[in-house]
Structure formats: structure tokens, C-alpha cells
Amino acid sequence: MQRSGCPITNVLDLIGDRWSLIIVRDLFIGRKTFKEFLNAPEGIASNILTSRLKSLTQSGFINYTRNPNNKKVKFYYLENKGIDLYPILYEMSMWSERNLNKPFHPLSTRWYLENKEKEPHLVIDNEKNNYIKLRHKLLEEVGKFV
């Protein structure tokens, strides 16, 4: 349900909570199972994680497939709608580096150093394309194709 005619409000209604973009980020960096999300350094509670995964799935940002070797395990992946969130993650990361005086995780520091001098659109396109390849590989492995 649309609460407002404001495009920012509409996006925030879907992904504006504390955890949704962290889950999207985690998918971009290769996490794909409930356990991997749960073990991320941010320490999301299992009930919140369950709720956000359900919400992101219902909104069409992510989907999942079952592990063929253990049907209890779901492999989550970004749909194209979720992949299109990458520019937001990119800009938030760059803003944080420019404006926050906080130490970053080594993975974030390495990513920033590798990308700070590159054209933003090239970084964004590259990361999105790399994720599409990762998703395709995952779905091939479980016998589903995009």
C-alpha cells in the first residue's frame, strides 16, 4: 500500500528498516543462507532476520531455492529488483567514507581502496554484473536456471 506520493517514502517503506539493506549487502558479498546472515558481524536476531527475509521475498527483492542436498536449507539470492539497489549501497558506502570518522571492516576498507578512483557507474555496473554471474552459478548448481 502506498503511503505517500514521495518516491523516497515509498522506497523506505520497503527497505528503510535497520536490516533490509544489510541483508542485500550480504547477498552481494556472497552470503546466501540463514546461518550466514545470522553469523554476520552486525548480529541480527533470528526473529528479525526471518521477518526481513520474508518481507524482502514478498516485495520481490530476493528469492530463494532449496539446497538439493538438504531441503531444510534455503539459498537466498537477489532478484533483478534487488540487484538494482546496488547504487544505493555504493553511495551509502562512499558517503560513509567521506563523512564518518570511524574505522571500517577490512573488507570495506579494501573495497573502498580498490574503487575510490574509479568512475562510479563502472563500479556499479561491474558489481551488478558480477552478482548476476554469481546468481546464475548458484541456480545452475541447484538445477534452476534464471
Image (tube, grey):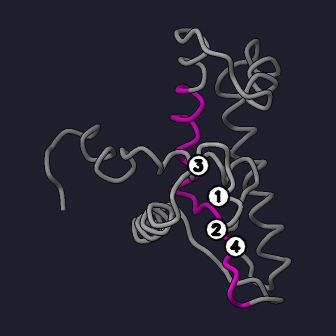
Q: Quadrant of residue 117?
A: top right
Q: Earlier in the sequence, mark 4 or mark 3?
A: 3
Classify mark 3: helix, strand or loop.
Answer: loop
How far apart are the two marked residues, 4 and 1, measured between alpha carbons?
11 Å
Residue on which disc 3 sits: 43
User: Which of the image's four quarters has the N terminus?
Assistant: bottom left
Dot 2 alpha-carbon crowd within 10 angstroms: few under 14, some 14 to 19, many 20 or more: some
Question: Which residue is depicted at the point 61% across and 14% down?
Answer: 102
* Residue 55 on the magenta segment: no
Residue depth check, mark 1 versus mark 3: number of the one nearer the observer = 3
Q: Which residue is mark 2?
A: 34
Question: Type of residue at label 4?
Answer: Phe
Q: Type of residue at label 2?
A: Phe
Q: Is residue 37 above or below residue 102?
A: below
* Secondary element at image label 2: helix
Instruction: Report the mark closest to the observer, 4 or 3.
Output: 3
Q: Tell whether 146 sits left or right of 78.
A: right
Mark with earlier residue (4, 1): 1
Tag 1–tag 2 contact (CB < 8 Å): yes
Front label number (4 vs 2): 2
Q: Position of residue 61 (x, y in %)?
A: 49, 60
Q: Are marks 4 and 2 in contact (CB under 8 Å)?
A: no
Q: Quick one: label 2 or label 3, which is nearer the N terminus?
A: 2
Numbered disc 4: secondary structure: strand
> Which of marks 3 and 1 precedes in the sequence?
1
Closer to the camera in the image, 4 or 146: 4
Quarter of the image for the C terminus: give it: bottom right
Is residue 87 or residue 96 the one in the foreground? 96
x and y, in percent, of residue 96 in the image: 55, 18
Question: In this picture, which residue range is highlighted in magenta?
Answer: 71-92
The residue where tag 4 is placed is: 75
